[in-house]
Amino acid sequence: MRSIDLNCDLGESYGAWRMGEDEAVLAQISSANVACGFHAGDPDTMRRTVQLAVARGVAIGAHPSLPDLQGFGRRELAVSADEAYALTLYQIGALAAFARGAGGALHHVKPHGALYNMAARDAALAAAIAAAVADFDRGLILVGLAGSALPQAGRAAGLAVAAEAFCDRRYRADGSLTPRRDAGAVIHDIDAAVAQGLSIALRGEATAGDGSRVAIAADTLCIHGDRPDAAAFARRLRSALGEAGVTIAAPVGGAQA
């Protein structure tokens, strides 16, 4: 029976500003990527999100980003490999403390936004992020875009990796994600996004923006927690996968939350 992980970026509220339907989404997923304060999240939000994940038995991951609260971590910044290493290690350590305090353990690391996309194509940045994860805990899983430099760097560092695919992002013919600034980059329609998730999970492929078929070997599917319909989408996707005979489980390789 086919098995795949469902992950979601959560804990992205900040102060009095609230984003997402985290508690409802947690009921549908197997892995949570928790914002660590650089693009979203704050100590109270991090703690609460981790506690909810532990209560649900959902694997806990750090979701480090570039230091860009105003841009939600989606603007590219000129950072060196050394800076990428330091900011990644810093954020992993912060989230791991909350996981430990809640009686859980860190399971994986998935970079966020611009840092994720930069590391997908920049081998030096990817290697720096992988080194930070390995130096913190070699039992952690590194999550990165399927077929990109980030999973390659993780394997080279001796880490278990999870190749990630996106249900609600349009792909380009080379397997990269269409930049968010481009029209049609985000698939807002739930039916279309669920259909793409099923195609990736069952057939290992998606349709690119130009109509070509893109091969994608994925271990985990991402649900964006900042979608206004994130909970409904998560329920629909999980139900559709179940009806297709796909089980939902976190990747094996790290400490379980």
Image: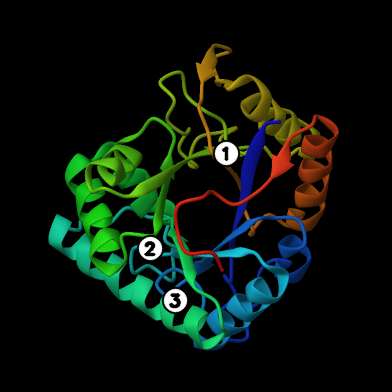
Q: Is residue 174 left or right of residue 25?
A: left
Mark carried by residue 95? 3
| Residue depicted at x 18% and y 64% | 83
What residue did someone put label 1 on?
166
Amino acid type at mark 2: Ser
Of residue 175 and residue 150, the one placed in the foreground of this image is 150
| Residue depicted at x 46% and y 69% | 106
| Residue depicted at x 66% and y 70% | 19
Amino acid type at mark 3: Leu
Amino acid type at mark 1: Phe
Which callout, 2 or 1, points at the residue further toward the start of the chain?
2
**Spatial distance from mark 1 to mark 3, Cα to Cα?**
24 Å
Of residue 87 and residue 93, the one placed in the foreground of this image is 93
Whether residue 42 is visible: no
Which callout, 1 or 3, points at the residue further toward the start of the chain?
3
What residue did someone put label 2 on?
65
**Spatial distance from mark 3 to mark 2, Cα to Cα?**
13 Å
Q: Secondary structure at mark 1?
A: strand
Q: Are marks 3 and 2 in contact (CB under 8 Å)?
A: no
Please say if 128 is above or below 93: above
